[in-house]
Image (cartoon, coloured by chain):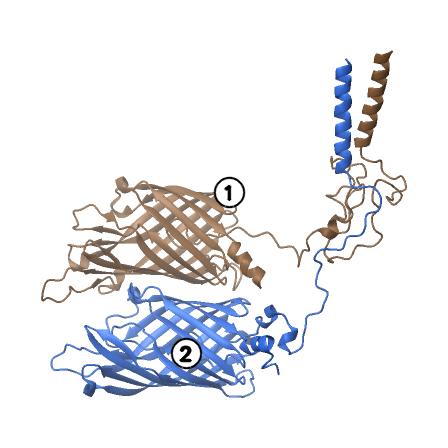
Amino acid sequence: MKQANAVVLATVLATGALARAQPAPPDPSGSAAGSPSIPAAPAASPPGPATAPAPAPATGDPATAGVPGAPADPDGLISGQPDTPLDPYAAAAAPARRGPPKPPRPPLDFPEVLTTPTGWLLPAGVLYSKDAIDTGGGVTSDNRVGLGDVAEFGVATTDQVRERQTMADKPERIQPYITASFRLGIAENRLFDQQPGVTLGFRKSFERNHDDEKTRIAELTLVASKHLGKRAALHVGGALWDASLQSTVTEPGQAPPPEITLHGHDYKNQIRPFGGFEARPLPRSEILIDLGWAPEFCYQCADTDKIKLRPELSWGVRYEVARFMHLESGVRVPDIGNFNLLDAQIFGQVTFTSFALKGAVDSLK
Amino acid sequence: MQRVLGLLLAIAVIAGAARAEADPPSGDPAPVAPEDGPNTTPPATGHDARAVSLGTLFRGPFHSSRLFAMPSADVVGAYILSLSGEGSLLEQPGVLTSAGVIAIGFGDIAQLEYRHTEAIGITGLDAPVPAVGVQLKLPIPEHSGVPAIGIAFRLGVPRGELQDGHELDETVTDLYLVGRLRFAGAPWLTLHGGTRISSAKAVPGSDPALATQRTLILPTAGYELAMTDTSKIIGEISLAPQFQWMPDATPATAPQIRRGLLGRLGMRWRILPSVIFDGSLGYQVDDAAPTAGFDAVVSWDIRLGAEVFVPWGALACRAVGVFCE
């Protein structure tokens, strides 16, 4: 008997507790005002921002509450969410949203294919950082910021500049070779429909003292980029290269050796075309290929051969890990002109983009 | 059996109690006022700086009185202080040229300033020469196609420049007459043009008798293309005095003063109403080295600069109650 009483008591208590844990049933009248356990929705919206959403119905689906045309879901069966009493003042206490909702950011067009510039600029205030390593021991970094949607400034280290003592020697890279760049341009479709993005870019190195030689490089580029549908883009441009080389070794009583420059010879040695192609076979993956040029110094060669431009071919893949992070990997052939694939390097690089500065500037406004 | 039932009972009671605590309290809660609702107070629109917020004071509008180097037919405005500076990143390592301007506006038609004016030194660099000056804007009503006129006088302060251990004092005093032209049909375009009458003087420190002075008439022109609400592309081209000297020449020769061509193409981005950012690439040709022409890209440079406007009159009004009229 005692056991039966205990079972009955336990059953009653457990049932009561479980019943207490269940949500309250909906008010048959459709109004929660009379429910003692559910706070009534205020007749008028509490004082608050005009953009604050209206309080959700007490027994509705919070995900669809207040949405015109959303189906009623009094018991939560449609949404699959358990009905829970809602705090009618939660909306009032939520932080105020100022202004209309921001549209989603369009995908970022990168300022470089792999090694050559594009006709696209970073948006105003957007930070860009690309760090790369390759199997040749090269380590580079490229950091840029978009200026006012019409320009871009950056500081980078490059390992594309190479040196050799004589033509018979194997060229070796000079690194780090620090450059600064400034690009100015017009966004794609800005002036008229189907207008390609166009940028005028200038990149110049700081003076580099290496092996008793003082070198500098500079590059003026004009490039146009055009999307071909949603999955491809083409880049075509021309570059006006310049470089200088001067020995820092001065014989006693002698004047310093003259400075050898690329512009001191035929201008045809300075002008080079370049370009690239992008294809996006998958939503987050791109195949990239580009052809560019890089200067090479030969210290013991004749004056006309001391500074040469070598063609450089690169191809690879860019994968979007996240909106702010891209991974790139591929192959770069520093001098495709001699078809020496033994010099080819496999590189990997990671690119970060950030809208933090843009957001900070916008918030200050 | 009893233990199992007791355990089930305890679990059920605890679960029920916990569920009940998560529920909102029954009954009508007291109304909660929003923590930070929108500011329903209308913004102050009076002219008294004490009645507006600090942020409102820095919203301007502010106007720059220059392109990159040439003055424009504008002044920074009454009770406004303009601080600007720029630097060349790449001339040569260790020789990062810089230039700055401090300008104070008076009466919406004039400004006093201390600035670095453009001149090409004996080392071939576009090295700014300090000057103090006054800039005036003629009070002519602005109409489409009718230029605004500005006059700027910059009194040069000597700058010492060393070459091979010899010092040369360079002074450049300028009188600018500039115009600014806008068109109602092309509000995105602003044209600038003018003439710089420059009196340049070079005095060798070792032999002042070899001093040279020359007056040059130097045209200057520029344009602005508004690209967005906050950014514009600016181009500028001008002639500038260029000093040349061979201190070790035998017999000793006097310095020479010639003309050099300076060009600048860049952008101006108004980051905030009171802060603008300049970036440009510069090109320089001098008639002393004709081989170094347009294709000498290695001698081009990149310049970055900024200008900050400070409404000092309004700040003084807020701080100590002066200049509030």
The image quarter in which residue B176 lies: bottom left
Q: Name the spot of residue A238 as percent of width and height, x first.
A: 36, 59
Q: Amino acid at mark 1?
A: Arg
Tag 1: Cα neighbours inside 10 Å, few (<14), some, or many (≥20)?
few
Left or right of residue A302, residue B87 in this image? right
Chain letter, colour brown: A
Image quadrant for the C terminus of chain B?
A: bottom right
Q: Quick check: B147 above or below A152? A: below
Chain letter, colour blue: B
Q: Name the spot of residue A167 as percent of width and height, x first.
A: 17, 50
Secondary structure under badge 1?
A: loop
x 84%, y 44%: residue:
B27
Decide which of B86, B83 is in the foreground and name it: B83
Left or right of residue A16, residue B174 in this image? left
x 52%, y 46%: residue:
A323
Camera sees residue B268: no
Numbered circle sitting on residue B70: 2
Left or right of residue A122, residue A46 in this image? right
Q: Chain of mark 1?
A: A
Numbered circle sitting on residue B173: none
**Residues flagged by tags 2 and 1 on a common chain:** no
Camera sees residue B105: yes
Disc 2 to disc 1, C-alpha distance: 48 Å
Q: Name the spot of residue A302 as percent of width and height, x first.
A: 15, 57
Q: Quick check: A106 above or below A364? A: above
The image quarter in which residue B159 lies: bottom left
Q: Amino acid at mark 2?
A: Met
Numbered circle sitting on residue A284: 1
